[in-house]
Amino acid sequence: MYIARRPVSGHYEYSLKESYYEAPYWRSKTVLNLGAFPEKYITYYSEVAFSIDLEEKLEKLGYNVDQWELERLFFRFLNPEAQRIITQFTRPTSIKRKRKEFDLKDIHPFDIKRRLVLKFGISNPGKYMDIPYPFLSELCNKSRDELENYFWDLEDGLKYREKIKYLLVIFDLLYLYPRIKPWELDEIFINNFCKILEDESFRMGLSAEELHSTYFCRYVWMYFDMILFFPVIKKYRAHTKSIYFEASKIFGISLEELEKVSIEDLFKIFRKKAKELHPDRGGSHEKFIQLRKIFEELLNIKKYS
């Protein structure tokens, strides 16, 4: 059982749901609607003592859920002090748990990618997609609705810059972002976004419209509300500066002149220098290779700046 949220007219509506298997996919069903304020089911006896008044109601519906399980489900809706006390007394122990067996083939690659980025904060999840990390078992035996709420909750814990980097990585935009025009980035984002929406194996029985309006709309909000204000990556700036510095030495042109040179003039400068350094004309093979490499990198920078 899990708590799901759904955007409705400027606010969220919450419900208790559960996933069940109906071939060929895991699906979800609503157990109990919680409305816009699940906090109303929490009764406080002091700042940290409370109970969640749903046991009887759920029992009538055929679900035996105790206070410990309800506490886990409603944790995000508790007041800060109650959350602090619970967290303090439920720290992970060193007890070894039995490793849950699972097959990576049963998990969609986009889900694996998102979980790896959320877990490790990495920029290149593709290198680790084939590793069966134990925590990936959390993605098994869940409906698309449960999975999206699972990821949504984890994404809420990201800080502003982390959230933008996460979005750029999962939609394969990170290394394009500083190099291409904003409208070109928008187009790539929309294309990658739509590819996922159109993937039936990802939707797991949901329509593309439902997946977009209920869950993936959050990525559209994140992209168009936040991405324009994200500063260019410092690493890329440093790389660009080093390329200009090296090119200045090789071409024998000042940095100021090189920065103003057009692409057409850059080709002329390259051809002239290539004639001097070409091995067939007595030049150094190593220096010629270095010249070609720095020219290609500089050309890339000129194209996308």
Image: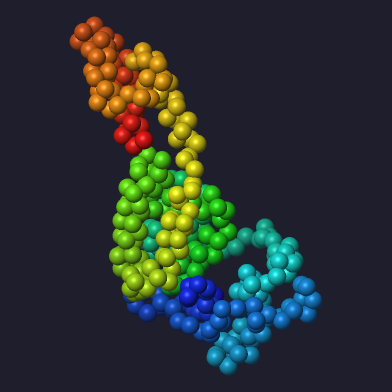
Above or below, 99 against 290 in this view is below
In the image as oriented, which residue stretches furthest toward the bottom?
A: 60
Whether residue 111 is visible to the viewer of this picture, yes or no, is: no
In the image as oriented, which residue stretches furthest toward the right?
A: 46
Whether residue 68 is visible to the viewer of this picture, yes or no, is: yes
Viewport quadrant of the C terminus? top left
Location of residue 209 in the rendering, given as x and y in whole percent from the top left corner: 34, 71
Location of residue 1 in the rendering, given as x and y in whole percent from the top left corner: 53, 77
129 sits to left or right of 18: left
Residue beneath the point at 34% across and 49% down: 183
Q: How many marks?
A: 0
Closer-to-camera residue (142/242): 242
Question: Can you tell which quarter of the image residue 67 is in?
Answer: bottom right
Location of residue 180 in the rendering, given as x and y in whole percent from the top left corner: 35, 42
230 sits to left or right of 69: left
Residue beneath the point at 41% across and 65% down: 216
Residue beneath the point at 48% across and 60% down: 136
Above or below, 183 against 34 in this view is above
Judging from the image, the colouring scheme is rainbow
Closer-to-camera residue (44/68): 44
169 sits to left or right of 251: right
Closer-to-camera residue (234/114): 234
Location of residue 92 in the rendering, given as x and y in whole percent from the top left corner: 67, 60
In the image as oriented, which residue stretches furthest toward the top?
A: 282
Question: Can you tell which quarter of the image residue 246 is in?
Answer: top left
